Image (cartoon, helix red, strand yellow):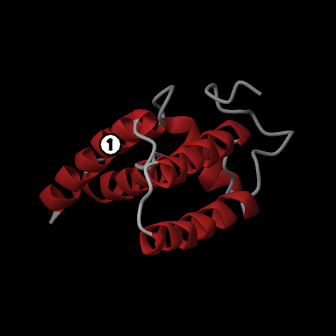
Amino acid sequence: MRAAYYVTGWMCVGLAVLGVALPLLPTVPFLLLAALCFARASPAAHDWLVNHPRLGPPIADWRAHGAISPRAKRLALASMAVSFGVPLALGAAAWVLAAQAVALTGVATFILTRPSTPAGAPASPADGD
């Protein structure tokens, strides 16, 4: 079972890294899942991930405060706008746009209702705020 967690953890890290560049692929949920898998499979991989200078801070923010950084919120909302705008501009079917609007509204609501990294807490290096 540890091997399955280990492989799944690395797959999630790969998807998270891809999510940095691809607008429809989330980054932080895959990082959180990778941390969970590594915690069950490999303390060394878990420590590497949570202490990574770029990948670790969003995990720490979520664990400590249930928070999403303001920068991550902006990037997520912008990518959702693009992912809705492109099919809209290309004349996608109304049912596709409606389904997409419902899903994106749900995700946006979740993101916007999460706290931002508290002012007293150390900000993630990637925040830029």
88 left or right, relative to 24: right
Q: Which residue is mark 1?
A: 13
Residue at horizontal 35 percent and vertical 51 percent from the top: 34
Q: Quadrant of residue 46?
A: top left
Q: Residue 79: x and y, percent?
A: 54, 44
Q: Residue 22: x and y, percent?
A: 40, 39
Q: How many numbered marks does the figure carry? A: 1
76 left or right, relative to 117: left
Residue at horizontal 31 percent and vertical 57 percent from the top: 37
Q: Quadrant of residue 32?
A: bottom left
Measured along the vertical axis of the image, is residue 27 above or below residue 96?
A: above
**Mark 1 Cα-neighbour bin, 10 Å: few <14, some 14–19, many ≥20:** many
Quarter occupied by the C terminus: top right
Q: Residue 109: x and y, percent?
A: 68, 66
Mark 1 element type: helix
Measured along the vertical axis of the image, is residue 20 above or below residue 67?
A: above
Q: Nearer the viewer, residue 18 or 86?
A: 86
Q: Residue furthest front?
A: 91
Q: Residue 9: x and y, percent?
A: 28, 51
**What amino acid is found at the position of numbered circle 1 in the picture?**
Val
44 left or right, relative to 31: left
Q: Quadrant of residue 123?
A: top right
Measured along the vertical axis of the image, is residue 121 above or below residue 3?
A: above
Q: Nearer the viewer, residue 89 or 47?
A: 89
Residue at horizontal 86 percent and vertical 39 percent from the top: 120
Residue at horizontal 45 percent and vertical 53 percent from the top: 87
Quarter occupied by the N terminus: bottom left
